[in-house]
Amino acid sequence: MERYINRGYEFIDAIRLAYGDLEGDYAFVIGHADDDKLYAFKKGSGMVVGLGEGFTCVSSDLPSILPLTRNVVRPQDGEIVTLWADRVELRSVKDGRLIKREPELITESMDAVQKGGYPHFMLKEIHEQPQVGRELLHLLAGSSEAPSRGETRGIQTLIDNMQRARHLYFIACGTSYHAALAGSVYFAQLAGRPAIPVLAPQFIAQYAPAVGHEDVGIFVSQSGETKDVLNALEAAEARGMDCYGLANVVGSTLTKATSFCLPLCCGYEISVPATKTFTNQVITFLYLAYRMAGLDTRVLDAIPDLMEKTIEAVAPQVEQIAGEINEWNDMYCLGYGATYPIALEGALKLKEITYAHCEGTLSTEFKHGPLSAVSKGFPIVFVAGPQDTPLIISGINEVKVRGARAIAIGEEDARLRANADDLIVIPKSDPQVNSLLAVLPLQLLSYHMSVMRGYDPDFPRNLSKTLTVD
Ligand code: F6R
């Protein structure tokens, strides 16, 4: 642009010419120091423009704009938006012609973008989990009762195609990857169907050359805009793979780019650390595994009440433990089988908002190296699945003799109580449901530690809710 401006072009024409020079996907906001306007344009990435009273704004996703205004315009590829404080204008990159587009009014409830009496969005969203879980299960139930209706027919087709598929891939990043990993455990344990969980960029490097139209992929993303995931989708589609989505933000790129995208029904998730979207991703995978196995999915209806009970039961104890271990900047979170993805997710939440180093790993791997890090008081969380208690206890003893503080999360069990320093009790349930419940105390632990450290858990440093870059 600088080159074109130096040659005497107007700012907007310099953008149009630069647009033609650029390769790849991007979203830019650009302005001139002594100008009263900004310009925004994009290719391949998400972009939403907000029109408020006396201001305009631009962002990569809708939820970040909604606390400010409900009037939005969605620019398309090949368009340049000019933003003044009181209006915006769209022009075509191709010929500079003005494009007329009325702003959209987002009418969904305001609740999602207000804290509703909670000090942080994260705490509110943790407490919303039972309710959004209930709504999701209700929607999914429609698919087994009336499989001929639009959206629900899509689920039946997905299940039929997964039954027939050569290989199944669950593809995602970050927290959504942990849900995909949990899904692969449930598919194998319940339906005897192996599925390959893989981080999206690694899918491109490792599996994309090997997939074809006989394979099915589910692309999992809260935002539906994560560039790494969209890149993987593009690579899979180029190979003819049968691609499906699982996304929260309706209207996002992922929902539009897949033939069928399962909705997460969480409403907007404002807090950067994903909580309610994770549990609804896990519930969806659990539901799909039940359907693949021909099991009665009505059993899952108990989950929301169990989540409510868990949050209520663990909250005071978790807050107390948070205070006691808060001086540590090194922690581990261990799990096994269905609780392994949960341990990874707990560790991610802890490092994301406490800025401490917390590693999640398979409990049996701890003796293969990390054990050497243990010193007196070193906090190690064990997520104990009901069927794995003896194995977990042997792990607990291994670290306790070296002085660690072993914090177990599991069902009431005399052996766990006798061996761990702390037992955070979650209600009795099936092993897979148990793993889902175990994430709740970990979310609360990370929340309290973050607040106790004086950080804002909703907006951790260096991170953004939607990652539209490679
Ligand atoms: C962690 C977190 C991130 C996201 C990751 C993928 O709390 O939120 O790890 O899970 O950036 O984002 P989505 O799910 O939007 O594709």
Image: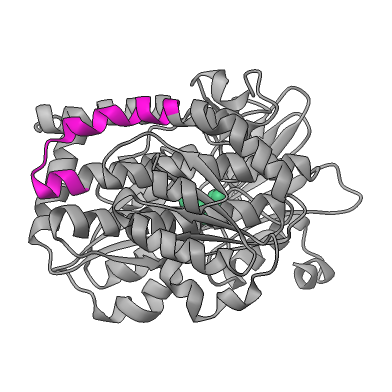
- Residue 54 percent location from the top left of the image: 78, 25
Q: Vertically, is 14 above or below 179?
A: below
Image side of residue 337 versus residue 28, left or right:
left
Q: How many numbered dots are placed on residues in this image?
A: 0
> Horizontal and vertical percent for residue 60?
59, 47
In the displayed image of the protein, which residue is found farthest to the right?
34
Which of the 4 image quadrants contains residue 287? top left
**In the image, is residue 226 part of the stretch drawn in magenta?**
no
Q: Residue at x 9, y 57 (%)?
A: 163
What colour scheme governs how the chains and residues are painted in the rendered image of this protein?
one colour
Answer yes or no: is residue 261 visible: no
The image quadrant of residue 406 is bottom right
In the rendered view, tell whether residue 89 sits above or below residue 1.
above
Out of 197 and 236, give the one closest to the viewer: 197
Question: Which residues, given as a range, are shown in magenta?
Answer: 289-309
Question: x%, y% of residue 380?
Answer: 58, 59
The residue shown at (51%, 48%) is: 76
User: Which quarter of the figure is the N terminus placed in?
Assistant: bottom right
The residue drawn where x is 24% and y is 64% is: 195
**Residue at (53% x, 33% y) in the render:** 314
User: Residue 52 versus residue 352: which sits nearer the camera?
Assistant: 352
Q: Quadrant of the C terminus?
A: bottom right
Question: Quarter of the image holding residue 392?
Answer: bottom left
Residue 129 position, x and y percent, is 45, 31
Side (left or right) of 344 relative to 232: right
Most common secondary structure along the magenta stretch = helix
The answer to whether residue 56 shows anywhere in this view is yes
Position of residue 374 in the picture relative to residue 155 (left or right):
right
Camera-side residue of 257 and 110: 110
Indicate whether 176 appears above or below 397. above
